[in-house]
Amino acid sequence: MKNAGAETASQYSGGDELPQDGRKICKAVHQYSKGKISSEDMDVLMDIGHGCMVVKNYIYQKYGGIKSLSKVYSGYEIDSEVRAARFREKIGLPSVYFSASVSRALADIKIMWAQVRNGINDAVSRNERFSPEDRHYIRFVLKTDICYWNILNEKAAPLPEKIQSGYEKVIAELGDGSRERVKNLNRYICRQTRKRLHRQHTDNELYFTIKKQGYRYGELDGTHGIFLATKINRKRIFIPLTDQNTYDRMLDIKLNPQNRTIEIIVSLFINIRRHEDYTNEVGISLGLWNMITTSTGNVYGSEFGRMQNEISDYILKEMRQNGKMKACDTKKYAADRAKMDAALKNYINREINRMLESEKPKAIYMAKLPRNPGMSMKGTGDTYFLKLWRKGFVTERLQWKCRKNGIQITEVIGKDIGIECSACGKKGHIEGERFQCQVCGFEENKKINSAKNAMIRGKTGKQLNKKFPQTKNEKAAKEMAEQ
Ligand SMILES: [Zn+2]
């Protein structure tokens, strides 16, 4: 993970697992400095940022490999090792920054290990040469740190009794010749791990973390702000803030030396909401015009296309007046754009909320969006590309709101989803807004038909990364455009 330090705090909530009752999710709140920070104070902060980067790279380097797998999860051992190495004293960083950087770097390493394990699990699911018993064995090893560590390091550290008996059970399941089989599977695990494991590194000096003991919210000359610890004992610098909020936890700080401003990112853990009355399963289809069409036949965000076009028209008009094929950078233009974008985002949020409240879903199925549509921004202006980006924003908001409300959201394979008949499964054709099936005579609005297909695919397990390989991005983008 390059620039691991720049990840926003919300990524520490870990993984894409489905939300469960009683679980919490991480929400990032932002605070901003008010006015320009003095160059001297900015230098002080830059110096701290540099130190934190050095600390993170030290941890990545020392504990990012297979030898440290089990240590990373205990944490305690690493703390005392780092203390014994007197590394903090060497770089002269206050411990409120130092130990925060250490925990952030360890969190990044854990995220990497989670990615490695998930990647191997996915590869194992896709690989047909494995028997169910093989898969069971590999999954057992991957989720049991000490077994996994033993195999990667060709060691035989004693396993706790309960794990030992579980391990013997999955080996016995492999049946005759299990000894050879275990060897082969272990080799597979090592190979797949080496392929996926990489040494993390960050060049980001502008992003660091501070523990709560290192700051204090308060007022100076009648302005609300935050006092931050510096490298000099007892000397704190004061940064005025645009809001009056105070927090009591680790904070991430992002420096913007060009503008001499900072941004504070606060990770709040909020409870996943429970909705006893959300019991429906709903398929949805996203559109560039109508934002969401559901399998139940409802449309949410019918102004989505019109609002986007208004923004496009504005950009094109401004560009023509400028006489160049380049967006202008006047203040008025930036302000107008920001206002229009904010109105659109607001609208998107409102309509997603309305959808969830009216449809009351416990599960939502939707076709997967292409991750990286291979399209350039030819001709500039608000082209197809920008609209796709907004569609990405819709998906991101939708996924966040689903997680927050304990709704399961599942992506299904999008291939041919628009031209398949949701009544009989054969291929039909589209005329204008209508879908028609010659085989069974079914007729429906094309987006509703798509949404119904999403639900059918989701319910029958035609989910991504399970049965179907991902289609090429460009092809998927094209198909989506034709839906
Ligand atoms: Zn049909």
Image (cartoon, rainbow, N blue to C red):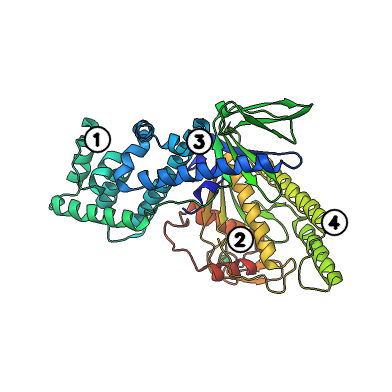
**Residue 410 horizontal side relative to residue 359, left or right:** left
**Residues packed near mark 3 inside 10 Å, few (<14), some (14 to 19) or many (20 plus):** many
Q: Which mark is residue 450?
A: 2
User: Spatial distance from mark 1 to mark 2, Cα to Cα?
Assistant: 47 Å
Question: Mark 2 and mark 4: span between their CA atoms?
Answer: 41 Å
| Residue nearer the viewer, 453 or 119 | 119
Instruction: Please tell me the numbered disc located at residue 163.
Output: 1
The three-letter amino acid code for the residue at tag 3 is Leu
Q: How far apart are marks 1 and 3 (CA)?
A: 41 Å
Where is residue 221, by image quadrant? top right
Disc 4 marks a residue whose amino acid type is Lys
Nearer the camera: disc 1 or disc 2: 1
Label 4 beta carbon less than 8 Å to ligand 1 = no
Residue bearing the label numbered 4: 332
Q: Is residue 182 above or below residue 428?
A: above
Q: Name the residue under label 3.
A: 93
Q: How many numbered marks does the figure carry? A: 4
